[in-house]
Amino acid sequence: MKKISAVLLVLALVGSAVFASFTGNAGVSFGVDLDGKSYGFDNTVELNAELNFFEKLVDKAGEGDIYAEIKAELTLGFDFAEIAANEYNPVGIDFDYDEDLDEEENPLSLSGLVANVEITSAKIIGDNWFVGILGALGAPNFAVTAIEVNDDGDALLDMRFLLDKAPGLTVGFSDFEFGLGVKGTYGDDPTYRILLSALTPEFAFSDGLTGQFGVAGLLADDEMGVFGSVKVDFAQDDLAISLASDIQYVKEGTADGVFDAEVALVASYDFLTADVYFATNVFDAEDQEAPASYVGSSNILSVQLGAVIEGFDITVKGLDLVNQQDISAKVGYGVTDELSVAVSGGYIISGAAKGTWSAGAEAEYAADMFTVAAEVGLVGTDAVDEVTGKVTLSSEALVAGATLSLEYESGNFLANKLGKITAKAVVEF
């Protein structure tokens, strides 16, 4: 193949001596394929790992006026598939076995091993500037809900942008960030996709008042989009308010353009907190982790109120108040400095899940070297339909510079869904 590649930037960012052997590289290139008649940026990553939880970590940021920095995350675990039980597998765990062999000749091997090693950041850094080589800066995204989040604290509800990630470069200078992404083909039926984006630093307008802005534009052969974001924060004495909004106008093919917007408000005063989230966007289950009940819904409004009174942490939540009215409450209490407990309950007033109730209990014990947390949940309509549980053991003190955790999360015990076990190590080096 005749291929000419104009390499703009290819770096090998290597980390070793982390968890016995943890090595990787990341790169970005721009090329033109004369045979395939295509062009554009390409971001690549390669990783290898051997696990040893007790090996000393090594900082892999480079040295000098211009240096390379890499951050990575390693996850190992077992995922128990949801299959029916049989004579070799009485509890329904997914094992590989040969039915032609008798039991003595057939040592069961677990097939549910799950492993993931991911480079989360790779940069070349200089004096007041950097170049990120994992992809182009996407559309700025400020208005994310603080009401529904996953275990990592990431929002489960968020307006679907077309520019979440694109092959290319991210360049930072004096706290400003810019993105450039290019992909396309040429010839008889050319295609193209060009992304430009920018993100400002946080500006201080007056005492306690700050703001940040972002814009992005997409131009492609079959679609175009314009995106904008703004965030304003105010803090003074016991009062703190954060208001953020994202808007997008997208036109795909010959269809009419569509305008969507979302707004997130977070406020606190003394012992009171309030979170409000509104979005006009219809959530797409294929593009994000939005709960199934939200798919196909628009004009989503959720509100959460909280208070800390005499050691009790009280939260009242109303999810999707326009469509479902999913109402719930949770009360937590710190028994000691190390031990805390909580109970919760909820009820859905309308919508497809009308009449569904939920209840749960949680406990957490935080020691110097580790934290252990456990929770159980019940869901039903007339009777109990679902019983779930989760236990997590984590430590930031066992290995310096790393967060280690071991977690068991069940499926529905009543349906014989055993769930999964995950060992996770988060390292920055």
Image (spheres, rainbow, N blue to C red):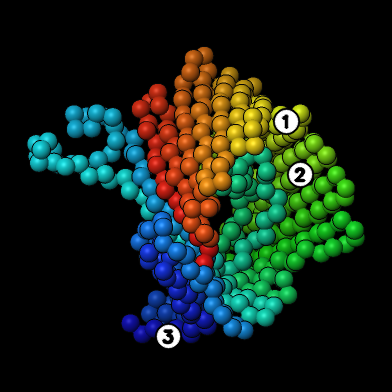
- Kind of residue at disc 1: Gly
Where residue 257 appears, as percent x and y from the top left, is 66, 54
Q: Between residues 270 and 172, which one lies in front from this camera angle?
A: 270
- Marks 3 and 2, how far apart in space? 51 Å
Mark carried by residue 4: 3
Label 1 to label 2: alpha-carbon separation: 22 Å
Query: Badge 1 is on which residue?
Result: 311
Classed neighbour count for the residue bearing mark 3: other residues with Cα under 10 Å, few (<14), some (14–19), many (≥20): few
Of the numbered discs 1 and 3, the one sitting upstream in the chain is 3
Q: Amino acid at mark 2?
A: Val
- State the image coordinates of residue 278 (x, y, percent, origin top left): 72, 41
Q: CA distance from mark 1 to mark 3?
A: 67 Å
Residue drawn at the location 46% of the way across and 24% of the way down: 386
> Is residue 167 depicted above or below 291 in this figure?
below
- Give the SS element for disc 3: strand
Q: Give the residue pinned by disc 2.
A: 266
Name the spot of residue 9 as percent of width and height, x first: 52, 81
Residue 255 or residue 393, whichever sits in front: 393
When asked about the image quadrant of residue 107, the answer is: top left
**Which residue is located at x 22 percent, y 29 percent?**
86
The residue located at (61%, 71%) in the rendering is: 170
- Using the rendered image of the protein, determine whether residue 173 is visible from the camera's viewpoint: yes
